[in-house]
Image: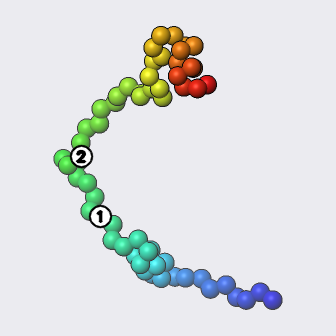
Amino acid sequence: MSEPVESFTDEEYAFLRHVRFGELPPPVRPEERAESTETDIRPDRPDPTGGESEWHLRAGG
């Protein structure tokens, strides 16, 4: 047997969001924003010294 499904009102949903997440922080104004700078991608591992075969011996692979 299926029971009737309760539907919340917009005010109830707003209250539940407030209880779960609290107050939002104030928005950041344009004059408070910082400019970002793109950087190079960091390599996963350093360049091998002494050749690729030596790197594999040191890494155990």
Look at the picture and state if 49 lies above or below 20: above
> Can residue 16 be seen by looking at this rendering?
yes
Q: Could you tell whether 26 is left or right of 41 in the image? A: left
Amino acid carrying label 2: it is Arg
Look at the picture and state if 45 lies above or below 34: above
Q: Name the residue rendered at 24%, 46% in the picture.
A: 33
Q: Name the residue rendered at 47%, 10% in the picture.
A: 50
- The percent coordinates of residue 54 (x first, y second) are 53, 15
Look at the picture and state if 20 lies above or below 56: below
As helix, strand or loop, the secondary structure at mark 1 comes to: loop
Q: Name the residue rendered at 29%, 64% in the picture.
A: 25
> Residue 42's quadrant in the figure?
top left
Amino acid carrying label 1: it is Pro
- The percent coordinates of residue 1 (x first, y second) are 81, 89
Q: Could you tell whether 54 is left or right of 11 in the image? A: right
- The percent coordinates of residue 35 (x first, y second) are 25, 38
- The percent coordinates of residue 38 (x first, y second) are 34, 30
Label 2 crowd bin: few (<14), some (14–19), many (20+), radius 10 Å? few
Task: Give yes or no for contact between labels 2 and 1 (Cβ–Cβ under 8 Å).
Answer: no
Q: Name the residue rendered at 54%, 25% in the picture.
A: 59
Tell me the residue that label 1 is attached to.
25
Q: Earlier in the sequence, mark 2 or mark 1?
A: 1
Give residue 5's mark.
none
Q: Nearer the viewer, residue 4 or 57?
A: 57
Q: Could you tell whether 34 is left or right of 4 in the image? A: left
Give residue 33's mark.
2
Look at the picture and state if 10 lies above or below 24: below
> Can residue 14 be seen by looking at this rendering?
no
Task: Say which quadrant the C terminus sits in.
Answer: top right
As helix, strand or loop, the secondary structure at mark 2 comes to: loop
